[in-house]
Image (cartoon, rainbow, N blue to C red):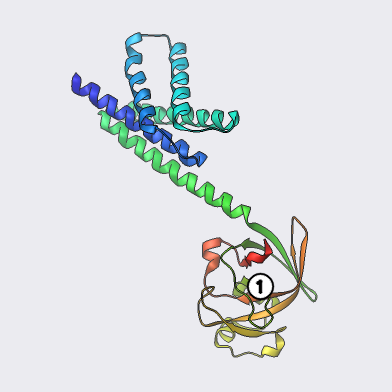
Amino acid sequence: MKIVIEQSLAINIFLNLLILKMVSRIMRRKTRLSFLSGIIGAILALIEPIWNIQPLLKICLMICTSFIMILISFKYISLKEFMLSLSLFMLATFLFGGACQVVNQTFGNFPLFIVAIIALVIFALVNIITKFVNHHRRMSKFTYNLTFIDGDKVIREEGYLDSGNVLYDTITKKPVVLITYDVFRKFYDNISLVSLVTKEFNSSSIKNGHYIKINSVGKGTSILIFTVDQLKVEGDERMYKNVSLGVSFSGFEKSFGKNVLLHCDFS
């Protein structure tokens, strides 16, 4: 009996720590005294069955326990943050409990360590989803709808504002907006990829076309730079004239999911 109680206590502490870690990841807030909070929650969870209280009171006790654990584990600057953390904690508790209930109904009773495994699987899934959402949120924060205007050509693209793009045209001293070949082809569809890579094309057909050597942005020793008449950043209606564009083969579109990489000066 003593071993079972010790195992239950350990599993409950482990679950509480996982739930607190999950809330911390979602809220992007650091925890404090999480182990103490986990112990308090585990002890209350173990002694609760002894009281033989009604279901409604059990729910109230669970809310109070969550309230205490969240109050101990996080610092707050507003009531809204506290209530959000409390809601996430309770939601995660129901999620873990619901998953265990489903497994129990499907496969019957299982050892306590299976609970820990189920919790780890759920934690991993939530962690993957959280990372995806946070990445999408960061990307959307620095993503802009762009309109390039060059003569009678109007080209619309989505661009990412990259603080790491600090490339300047060594001739004009202007910041360089990096683009992929797919975007370049919309300006000059008569120049093939092979011709561009081998530099075997009529450079006079490209407005202010020239090559500059690069060290860190983009791969290779040099990239083609050319000029377009205007670049319009939608949303705040910013307009830039005579913008330098550089054709990059670095594969940045795979990392950022955009075919245009704005210079940091465009922030």
Q: Quadrant of residue 209?
A: bottom right
Q: Position of residue 228 (x, y in %)?
A: 73, 76
Q: Is 71 above or below relative to 190?
A: above
Whether residue 50 appears in this view of the structure is yes
Report the number of numbered marks. 1
Along the horizontal axis of the image, is 145 left or right of 60?
right
Q: Residue at x 57, y 52 (%)?
A: 138
Q: Amino acid at mark 1?
A: Pro
Relative to 144, residue 133 above or below: above
The quadrant in which residue 267 appears is bottom right
Query: Which residue matches tag 1?
Result: 175
Question: Residue 109 versus residue 26: which sits nearer the camera?
Answer: 26
Tell me if residue 44 comes above or below residue 165 in the rendering: above
x then y, percent, for residue 187 = 70, 76
Residue depicted at x 71% and y 84%: 208
Q: Quadrant of the N terminus?
A: top left
